[in-house]
Amino acid sequence: MPDMTEEVKVEEAAAKKAAPAKKAAAKTTAEKTAVKKTAAKKTADKKPAEKKKAAAKTAETKSGKMLKITLIKSLIGAVPKNKAIIHSMGFKKLNSTVILPDNAATRGQIRLIAPMVKVEEMN
């Protein structure tokens, strides 16, 4: 019989040690939610700035030049990176044409897929 009481005491001691650990875990989750809320507030503050950037880009494309790009080669056998670039540019199928702004990003994409496309400048 004395062995069982010792086992019960050991189990109770272990339970007491585990209880503060659970409380600490609860505090960390509360802290995590607080951090998430502050991060959400920061992103909410950035949204008007993003709107300004988007407006600046549209104004830039209206005043700047545009490129008319036509896909003239098939994607069969193309490198997966080049396939992804072509899809991101908006091509749907062979001989399709997209009109994109003439900027550094577009020129960089064109440089990578130059053998597959025909580029014309529009004013």
Image: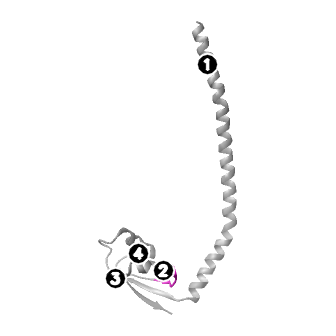
Amino acid at circle 2: Thr
Q: Residues within 10 Å of mark 2 (few under 14, many from 20)?
A: few
Q: Which mark is residue 10?
A: 1
Q: Are marks 2 and 3 in contact (CB under 8 Å)?
A: no
* Numbered disc 2: secondary structure: helix
The residue that appears at 68% across and 35% down in the rendered structure is 23
- Give coordinates of residue 67: x percent, y percent: 47, 86
Q: Are marks 1 and 4 in contact (CB under 8 Å)?
A: no
- Give coordinates of residue 9: x percent, y percent: 63, 16
Q: Which mark is residue 31?
A: none
Sequence-earlier tag: 3 or 4: 3
The residue that appears at 59% across and 84% down in the rendered structure is 60
Depth check, mark 1 against mark 2: the one in front is 1
Indicate left or right for 2 with 113 as reference.
right
Image quadrant where residue 48 sits: bottom right
Sequence-earlier tag: 2 or 3: 3
Q: Is residue 16 above or below residue 64?
A: above
CA distance separating discs 1 and 4: 67 Å
The residue that appears at 67% across and 72% down in the rendered structure is 49
CA distance separating discs 1 and 3: 77 Å
Type of colouring: one colour
Sequence-earlier tag: 1 or 3: 1
Depth check, mark 1 against mark 4: the one in front is 1
Residue at which label 2 appears? 106
Per the rendered image, the range of residues in magenta is 99-107
Amino acid at circle 1: Val
Indicate left or right for 7 with 115 as reference.
right
Depth check, mark 1 against mark 3: the one in front is 1
Residue at which label 3 appears? 72
Indicate left or right for 71 with 1 as reference.
left
Amino acid at circle 3: Ile
Sequence-earlier tag: 4 or 2: 4
